[in-house]
Image (cartoon, grey):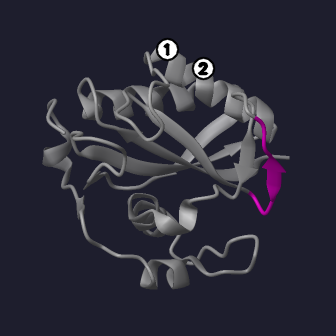
Amino acid sequence: MPVEVYIALGSNLECPPLQITRAIRALAKLPSTRIVKQAPWYRSLAIGPGPQANYINTVVAITTTLTPLRLLKALQSIEQQQKRKHRVRWGPRTIDLDILLYGRKTLNREARNRNALIIPHPRLQQRNFVLYPLADIAPHLVLPDQTPLQQLLANCCPEGIVRLEAGETRGCTG
């Protein structure tokens, strides 16, 4: 049975609009998966170490029959195809794909390898660049712990995030 899943996308290297577009196209090609909604794009300040370019962020809703771990592996494959390198935690990247929510499921599979998976995403509540686009496509969403998305949004600082108009997402500036 297909499950609705929300995936965050972000990029601040090598033409972020192109990187986001490529990742969305790759998501659409995943087996047993269909994109059902796509949020507007946002420009946000980098939260990682050192000076970094601004990010372009969005969220997509998909339906899939892939298991959480198979979906994680598929997302990692997309990241690898787009030459993502894990140099520094929260450092600059060509593409970052994160599973935010997988239906009503909660999962805590912590590990020191690339198969660690925590659902809902452990920093979902702290990230305006995830909450704003998520609210655009799922304004009445309630998290598995029964917290309404609107409550998280009300407690979220809007500083450093700007919703982009369609024309602003063209080209290669971040």
Residue 140 on image: x %, y % = 57, 78
Q: How many marks?
A: 2
Tell me which segment is drawn in magenta.
103-111
Using the image as rendered, state which of residue 92 and residue 121 is in the foreground: 92
Q: Secondary structure at mark 2?
A: helix
The answer to whether the residue labelled 1 contacts the one labelled 2, judged by CB atoms less than 8 Å apart, is yes
Where is mark 1, residue-wise?
81
Q: Quadrant of residue 122?
A: bottom right
Using the image as rendered, state which of residue 34 and residue 105 is in the foreground: 105
Query: Quick check: is 33 in the magenta stretch?
Result: no
Q: Quadrant of residue 64?
A: top right
Where is mark 2, residue-wise?
77
Most distant residue in the front direction = 50
Q: Is residue 81 above or below residue 65?
A: above
Q: State the CA–CA distance, disc 1 to disc 2.
A: 6 Å
Callout 2 amino acid: Ser
Question: Of the numbered discs in the image, which one, if any, rests on residue 120?
Answer: none
Callout 1 amino acid: Gln
Looking at the rendering, in which quadrant would you find the C terminus?
A: top left
Q: Please indicate, yes or no, whether residue 32 appears anywhere in the rendered image.
A: no
Residue 59 on image: x %, y % = 47, 51
Q: In the picture provided, is 84 more to the left or to the right than 66?
A: left
Q: Is residue 132 above or below residue 1?
A: below
Q: Residue at x 75, y 58 (%)?
A: 103
Residue 165 on image: x %, y % = 18, 55
